[in-house]
Image: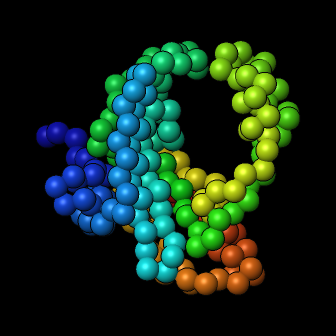
Amino acid sequence: MGVVTLIRYDLGIHALHVGARVYPVKYWRSHDGYGVSTRQAVLDFENRWGLSIIWGSMNYGDNYHHHGPMGDIWEKETQPFVEQPNEVEVGVYGPEPTVLPGMKPETIELMREGGNPYLTAEAAESMMADRETPLFCDPFGWVDDVNLNKLIGYVMALPSHPTDDEKDGIRESLEAQAWQLV
């Protein structure tokens, strides 16, 4: 008996299969280059919320050890790319953009100490700056089909025009549920 693929994109009907459920995809991106592969399906819902489901090189899912051109920076064996994964990384899009704080200088310093050869001064400055993003909260990693279906159901039921207090409660609820998604 072969491995059952639980999450896959269907180009023929422009849909994402998550277990036994099928969802229409608003936007699909497939990129392969320089040894790095990325797949992204964006789901938009009538309530102005959405999800970005990503599987690709070094994402928190089945392709975590597919390193591409960076080589083996974690001293682990590079694995083949998984086109139809069982676990993916998921970002929640809110109805309005969110401003996320930049990385702390201490984090940048740890990256430098770790010998990251791609961390230029310009890149470090950019990473420390606050930035506007459509993401509502930090992405969730290692999400399987069962938890992805739960998250889709949760996000589809959110209010379309939440107050600031409701947004705070939604963010807290998503963060509290994150342990279920790991």
Image location of residue 154, percent across then percent down: 49, 74
* Location of residue 120 by image quarter: top right
User: Viewer-proximal residue, 27 or 105?
Assistant: 27
Query: Camera-side residue: 166 or 148?
Result: 166
41 on left or right of 58: left
**Quadrant position of residue 3:** top left
Residue at position x 43%, y 74% in the image: 45
Q: Is residue 80 left or right of residue 163?
A: left
Residue 137, position in %: x, y?
A: 65, 60
Q: Is residue 154 left or right of residue 110?
A: left
Q: Is residue 152 above or below residue 103?
A: below
Q: Residue most toward the left?
A: 1
Residue occupying the point 42% across, 43% down: 55
115 vs 65: above or below:
above
Along the line of sight, which residue is nearer the eye, 146 or 55? 55
Residue farthest to the front, as pictured: 122
Label tally = 0
**Residue 6 x %, y %:** 29, 52
Residue at x 43%, y 22% (from the top left corner):
34
Quarter of the image where the N terminus is located: top left
Residue at 58% across, 17% down = 73
| Residue 62 visible, this orientation | no
Q: Using the image as rendered, state which of residue 76 and residue 180 is in the foreground.
A: 76
Residue 146 sits above or below residue 75 on the image: below
Q: Is residue 143 above or below residue 26?
A: above
Q: Position of residue 68 (x, y in %)?
A: 45, 22
- Asked which colour scheme the image uses, the reply is rainbow
Residue 75 in sight here? yes
